[in-house]
Amino acid sequence: MIAQVDVQLAAADDTVPTADDIAIWINRAIDAAGRSGDMEVSVRVVNAAEMRQLNSEFRDQDKPTNVLSFPAGDLAGLPDDAERPLGDIVVCSAVVADEAEQQGKTPGDHWAHMIVHGTLHLMGFDHENDRDAAEMESLEIRIMTDHGIANPYADSLGELSQEN
């Protein structure tokens, strides 16, 4: 199964991965979560102003954030053979670049983590309580380390950080 991925670049810098790389990480997350079927995901890369507006409108937080996910939910009436919209992921390129630098991560590794994190949110994973956070983070760590990227929740000393 390969999800159909649409990438919109409303802001770009030299750290934004290619649409193909974004699609690879989305599909890795979907596969690791055990999902199947034809799916569709949209990713919009935005600047800090647009992300601040979205974060304010949908989360009542008047600041830009790294990633927001908007699950599509169940849509009645789609033909059985139609791709199922999984939802939309919005990523702020400036915040991701700043976080990568602050956390001593390569931009590519941090982008991969943000795409995986956003995709898991589309599939219903959450980190609102300790149990759910542990489940989601464990899956994120496995996806990342299975593909050659260090535990995204460990700092440079190998200690767990509080990123979420």
Image (cartoon, helix red, strand yellow):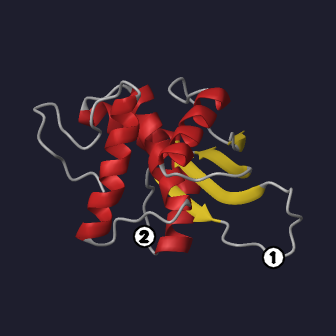
> Would you call the spot at circle 2 few (<14 residues within 10 Å), some (14-19), or many (20 or more)?
few
47 with respect to 137 (left or right)? right
- Left or right: residue 132 compared with residue 111: left
Residue 15's place in the image compared with 120, above or below, is: above
Q: Which dot marks residue 61?
A: 2
| Closest to the observer, 132 or 69 | 132
Q: Quadrant of residue 78?
A: bottom right
Q: Position of residue 154 (x, y in %)?
A: 20, 39
Which residue does the image show at 46% across and 35% down from the upper left? Answer: 112
Question: Which of the two residues, 64 or 41, is positioned nearer the viewer here?
Answer: 41
Considering the image in quadrants, where does the N terminus appear? top right
Residue at left offset 66%, top offset 31%: 19
For the point 34% across and 28% down, which residue is it?
Answer: 149
Quadrant location, the C terminus: bottom left
Q: Which residue is mark 1?
A: 76
Residue 74 lies in quadrant: bottom right
Earlier in the chain: of badge 2 and badge 1, it is: 2
How many numbered marks are there? 2
Amino acid on which disc 1 is placed: Ala
- What is the spatial separation of the Cα atoms under label 2 and label 1, in whole angstroms? 32 Å
> What amino acid is at disc 2?
Gln
Of tags 2 and 1, the one toward the viewer is 1
Residue 23, horizontal then vertical, whole percent: 63, 36
Locate residue 6 relative to residue 17 in the image: left or right: right
Q: Nearer the viewer, residue 65 or 128?
A: 128
